[in-house]
Image (cartoon, rainbow, N blue to C red):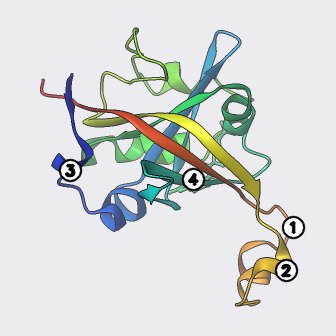
């Protein structure tokens, strides 16, 4: 693993999150859980480089994110697409997803780092807030995306470390 600066990133954010997808992971009480995410962003606020994540309340990973001060985003090469599909379909409440997906945690970081990831952001939570229906200007989004009223919680997390896998 080699550390790089945010300015050295070659990824296009729309491709990396929207198309490649990311694995969001957090640890709490000696356990780690992770889930696939394709909604979110990267940017700058409060003079910090950050990621934005949108997590629905029913995600098991959310309980880990809420208990931890840190989280990670991992990006994988295309060969891991099936793994990301699995991590985005099954809940860690029902299966030990990380073991079943053959992912290997690397010790020594503030948030989960997987040996198999080509790129990892180790992040520190800065802010979170639940989206509310009155905040939407385009009200069509509500029935399209929230028929069950399970509004996402948005998390803003500072990118503390960017690791690239040079294996
Ligand atoms: C491609 C893809 C993208 C997803 N993006 C998100 C997302 O941005 N936010 C979210 O809350 N759930 C998202 N999900 C759903 C979760 O990954 C899924 O519900 C997962 O099984 C939750 O696992 P957990 O209960 O172990 O946390 C996505 C799923 C897939 C397949």
Relative horizontal placement of residue 83, taking residue 91 as reference (left or right): left
Q: Mark 3 = which residue? A: 7
Left or right of 29: which side holds 22? left
Few, some or many C-alpha atoms within 10 Å of disc 2 (few <14, some 14-19, many ≥20)? few
Marks 1 & 3, CB-CB < 8 Å contact: no
Q: Nearer the viewer, mark 1 or mark 3?
A: 3
Q: Is mark 2 within 8 Å of ligand 1?
A: no
Write down the residue under mark 1. Answer: 149
Does mark 4 have its CB less than 8 Å from ligand 1?
Answer: yes
Task: Tell me the quadrant of the picture where the N terminus can be found.
Answer: top left
Mark in the foreground, 4 or 3:
3
Q: Which callout, 2 or 4, points at the residue further toward the start of the chain? A: 4
Tell me how far mark 3 sits from mark 2, CA to CA.
36 Å
Of mark 2 and mark 1, the one earlier in the sequence is 2
**What residue would you read off at disc 4?**
53
Q: CA distance from mark 1 to mark 3?
A: 38 Å
Could you say which disc has been placed on residue 134 in the image?
A: 2
**Residue at the spot 78% in from the left edge and 80% down from the top edge:** 142
């Amino acid at each position: 693993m080699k550390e790089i600066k945010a300015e050295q990133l070659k990824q296009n954010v729309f491709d990396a999150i929207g198309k490649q997808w990311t694995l969001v992971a957090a640890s709490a009480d000696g356990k780690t859980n992770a889930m696939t995410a394709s909604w979110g962003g990267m940017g700058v606020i409060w003079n910090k480089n950050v990621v934005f994540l949108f997590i629905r309340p029913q995600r098991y990973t959310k309980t880990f994110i809420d208990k931890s001060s840190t989280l990670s985003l991992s990006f994988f090469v295309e060969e891991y697409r099936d793994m990301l599909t699995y991590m985005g379909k099954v809940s860690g409440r029902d299966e030990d997803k990380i073991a079943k997906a053959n992912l290997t945690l690397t010790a020594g970081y503030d948030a989960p780092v997987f040996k198999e990831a080509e790129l990892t952001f180790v992040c520190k939570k800065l802010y979170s807030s639940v989206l509310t229906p009155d905040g939407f200007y385009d009200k069509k989004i509500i029935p399209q995306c929230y028929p069950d009223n399970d509004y996402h919680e948005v998390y803003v997390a500072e990118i503390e470390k960017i690791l690239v896998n040079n294996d």
